[in-house]
Image (spheres, rainbow, N blue to C red):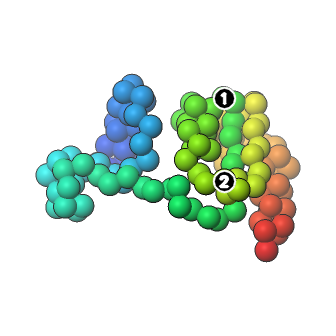
């Protein structure tokens, strides 16, 4: 049995190296994919049809979701979907969860955004 978390990071790294910009379901390998998806490759998520008002929060020091990834995501979403786009130059991936100033700079903005959409 494979450790899924290790596999996830391996796949993330491989996509990074290849520059693969697809957003797809988990890749279990050809055999596993066939059993789960009836295809040798995992299906892609079609996010172009999403219509949920979305706020994007990105960090300038985020190596797991760098500005190229965020720009790609923006280009995949339909017009008018992104209602707020917040770029925090000094934030990295973990700052969004454990940063000392996250409440003031992120969480309060998220709560306001959600309330504004209701």
Quadrant the C terminus occupies: bottom right
Q: Is residue 14 visible?
A: yes
Q: Secondary structure at mark 1?
A: loop
Name the disc covering residue 79, or none.
2
Q: Secondary structure at mark 2?
A: loop
Identify whether 89 is placed above or below 36: above
Q: Position of residue 1 (x, y in %)?
A: 19, 52
Crowd tier of the residue under label 1, counting other residues whose Cα lies within 10 Å: few below 14, some 14–19, many 20 or above: some
Name the disc covering residue 61, or none.
1
Count up the numbered dots: 2
Left/right of residue 68 with respect to residue 53 in the rendered view: left
32 vs 38, nearest the viewer: 38
Q: Is residue 66 visible?
A: no
Identify whether 115 is placed above or below 3: below
Q: Position of residue 3 (x, y in %)?
A: 29, 48
Left/right of residue 15 with respect to residue 96 in the rendered view: left
Left/right of residue 111 with respect to residue 36 in the rendered view: right
CA gap between label 1 and label 2 equals: 27 Å
First along the sequence among labels 1 and 2: 1
Residue found at x 35% / y 31%: 14
Name the disc covering residue 4, or none.
none
7 vs 85, nearest the viewer: 85
Name of the residue lying farthest toward the front: 79
Q: Position of residue 20 (x, y in %)?
A: 40, 34
Residue found at x 61% / y 39%: 70
Which image quadrant is residue 101 in?
Answer: top right
Which image quadrant is residue 115 in?
Answer: bottom right
Q: Position of residue 64 (x, y in %)?
A: 54, 36
Are the residues flagged by discs 1 and 2 in contact, CB closer than 8 Å? no
Residue found at x 53% / y 55%: 48
Disc number lying in front (1 or 2): 2
């Amino acid at each position: 049995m494979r450790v899924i978390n290790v596999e996830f990071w391996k796949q993330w790294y491989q996509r990074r190296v290849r520059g693969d910009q697809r957003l797809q379901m988990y890749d279990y390998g050809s055999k596993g994919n066939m059993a789960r998806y009836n295809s040798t490759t995992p299906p892609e998520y079609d996010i172009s049809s999403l219509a949920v008002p979305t706020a994007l929060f990105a960090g300038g020091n985020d190596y797991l979701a760098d500005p190229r990834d965020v720009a790609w995501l923006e280009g995949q979403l339909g017009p008018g979907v992104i209602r707020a786009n917040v770029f925090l130059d000094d934030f990295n991936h973990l700052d969004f969860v454990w940063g000392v100033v996250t409440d003031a700079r992120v969480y309060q903005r998220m709560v306001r955004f959600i309330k504004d959409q209701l």
